[in-house]
Image: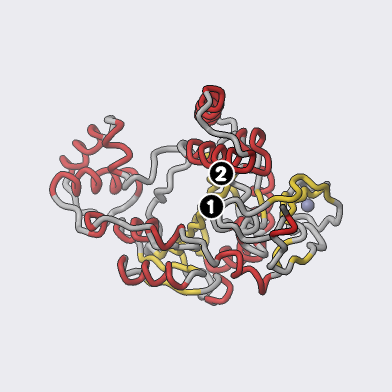
C-alpha cells in the first residue's frame, strides 16, 4: 500500500518542458514505484503536449537526488577479469591491429601489410568480427569510434570503467566523469583511469579539449540534459563525435509493459527519450546528428527485466507458456525491427558531431 511507503524524497513540480519550454502536458504513468531498489514513494511521468518529451513531474528535488542512489549497486559490482587489462599479443594483436588500423584509423597499431590483409579476410568470420572490435559491436549502433585527432576521449558516467578502459586499450587518452565516488575509485585503481568525481559542469574542462565523447545511460538521469549537452559541445573539438545511449520510450517492450517497463526506472530516470526528442535535444545543443538507431542486443535484457517486475507487482508466477511466448516474440520483433531499421528496440544509440 502507498500509505506504508510515504515519499521520503522531496518532490518538486517541473514548470516548463526542458526541450521546448511548453507548460502543457498529459500524465502517462502515475503511481509508479521504484521496482528495482525500493526507494520509497510513488512517482509520476508526463508527456509534453507540444514536443512529446516524456519526463518525471513532480520529480525529486535536485538536492535530494543522491537519496535515489543509496542502494544503486550496478557500478560497484562490475568486475573485469585480469585478461582485460593485459596487453594483447600474438594473433590477437595483429588481427585487432589490422582491422582497427585499416578500417577505423588507429594508425598507432604497428602491423604489417600482410597482417592487415589477413586480418581483413578473417573479418568475414562473424566470431572474429565482434571480438576484433573488443566486443563493442559491428555496424549500426557499434560503440567503437574512429580514431581522431590526438585521441582525447571523455567518458561521462564512467561507472567502474569498463568502456573507458576499452577506449584506453585502443589508444585513447581517456578522462572519465563519474558522480559515484566508490565507482570512480574502482575505475581509477583497477583500470588506472583518470576520473573526475562530480558532474561534467563542475569539472570545468577547457573548451575544445576532446576528440570523442561517450555518454551511455546517463542523459536520462540528468536534471538538465540540455545544459549538459551544451557543455559537451563546448569541450569538444570541431568535428569531434559524441555517442549517446539511453532507453527508447518508443520501444515495443514499453508499449507492452507500460510503467513496468525496465527503462522507466523511477525515480532515477528523470527523462525518457524517443528517437525524435533525443534528436531534437542534440540539435538544440548545437550538434549535427549523423545517425540514430536502436542497438542490436538490448531487448532481451529489457524484456526479461520488465517481465520480472510485472510478475512481482501482479503476484503472478512466471512459468506460463504464454509468458514465454510473449517475451520470445518481443525479443524477436526488436531484432527484426533492427534489421528493418524500425526503431522499436529498447536502447537508442545516437551519434552526432560538432560541426560549424
Ligand atoms: Zn516540450
Q: Residue furthest right?
A: 24
Q: Does the rendering let one see residue 336?
A: no
Against 46, residue 128 (above or below) is above
**Neighbour class for label 1 at 10 Å: few (<14), some, many (≥20)?**
many
SS at circle 2 = strand
Residue 244, disc: 1
Furthest-left residue in view?
90
In the shown orientation, is residue 100 left or right of residue 111? Answer: right
The residue at 41%/51% (across/down) is: 145
Q: Give the mark nearer the N terminus: 2 vs 1.
A: 1
Residue 173 appears left or right of 281: left
275 over 179 or under it: above or below: above
| Residue with the mark numbered 2 | 348
Q: Residue at x 22, y 54 (%)?
A: 83
Is residue 182 left or right of 120 when viewed as pictured?
Answer: right
How many marks overall?
Answer: 2
x%, y% of residue 20?
Answer: 78, 55
Vertical arrangement, residue 207 with respect to residue 274, above or below: below
Q: CA distance from mark 2 to mark 1?
A: 8 Å
Given residues 106 and 19, the one toward you in this image is 19
Q: Residue at x 34, y 50 (%)?
A: 105
Residue 355, percent from left and from top? 57, 56
Q: Position of residue 314 (x, y in %)?
A: 64, 39
Circle 2 Cα neighbour tier, 10 Å, few/some/many (<14 / 14–19 / ≥20): many
**Within 8 Å of ligand 1, the CB of disc 1?**
no
**In the structure shown, which secondary structural element does the residue marked by tag 1 occupy?**
strand
**Callouts 2 and 1 close, C-beta under 8 Å:** yes
Quarter that holds the C terminus? bottom right
Residue 59 coordinates in the image, percent (x, y): 72, 62
Q: Which quadrant holds residue 6?
A: bottom right
Amino acid at each position: 500500500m502507498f500509505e506504508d511507503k510515504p515519499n521520503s524524497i522531496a518532490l518538486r513540480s517541473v514548470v516548463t518542458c526542458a526541450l521546448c519550454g511548453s507548460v502543457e502536458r498529459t500524465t502517462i504513468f502515475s503511481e509508479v514505484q521504484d521496482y528495482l531498489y525500493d526507494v520509497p514513494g510513488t512517482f509520476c511521468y508526463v508527456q509534453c503536449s507540444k514536443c512529446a518529451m516524456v519526463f518525471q513531474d513532480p520529480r525529486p528535488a535536485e538536492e535530494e537526488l543522491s537519496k535515489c542512489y543509496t542502494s544503486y549497486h550496478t557500478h560497484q559490482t562490475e568486475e573485469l577479469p585480469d585478461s582485460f587489462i593485459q596487453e594483447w599479443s600474438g594473433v590477437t594483436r595483429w588481427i585487432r591491429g589490422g582491422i582497427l588500423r585499416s578500417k577505423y584509423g588507429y594508425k598507432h597499431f604497428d602491423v604489417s601489410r600482410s597482417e592487415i590483409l589477413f586480418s581483413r579476410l578473417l573479418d568475414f568470420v562473424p566470431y572474429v568480427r565482434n571480438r576484433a572490435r573488443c566486443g563493442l559491436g559491428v555496424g549500426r549502433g557499434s560503440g567503437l569510434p574512429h580514431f581522431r585527432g590526438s585521441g582525447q576521449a571523455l567518458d561521462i558516467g564512467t561507472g567502474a570503467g569498463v568502456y573507458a578502459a576499452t577506449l584506453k586499450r585502443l589508444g585513447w587518452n581517456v578522462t572519465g566523469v563519474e558522480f559515484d565516488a566508490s565507482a570512480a575509485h574502482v575505475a581509477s585503481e583497477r583500470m588506472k583511469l583518470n576520473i573526475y568525481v562530480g558532474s561534467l559542469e563542475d569539472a570545468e574542462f577547457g573548451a575544445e579539449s576532446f576528440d570523442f565523447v561517450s555518454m551511455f545511460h546517463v542523459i536520462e538521469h540528468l536534471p538538465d540534459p540540455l545544459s549538459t549537452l551544451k557543455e559537451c559541445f563546448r569541450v569538444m573539438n570541431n568535428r569531434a563525435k559524441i555517442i549517446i545511449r539511453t532507453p527508447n520510450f518508443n520501444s515495443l517492450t514499453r508499449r507492452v509493459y507500460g510503467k513496468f517497463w525496465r527503462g522507466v526506472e523511477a525515480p532515477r530516470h528523470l527523462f525518457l527519450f524517443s528517437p525524435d526528442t533525443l534528436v531534437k535535444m542534440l540539435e538544440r545543443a548545437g550538434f549535427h546528428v549523423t545517425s540514430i538507431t536502436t542497438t542490436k542486443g538490448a531487448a532481451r535484457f529489457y524484456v526479461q527485466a520488465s517481465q520480472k517486475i510485472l510478475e512481482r507487482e501482479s503476484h503472478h508466477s512466471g512459468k506460463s507458456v504464454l509468458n514465454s511466448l510473449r517475451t520470445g516474440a518481443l525479443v524477436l520483433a526488436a531484432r527484426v525491427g533492427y534489421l528493418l531499421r524500425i526503431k522499436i528496440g529498447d536502447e537508442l544509440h545516437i551519434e552526432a558531431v560538432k560541426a560549424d
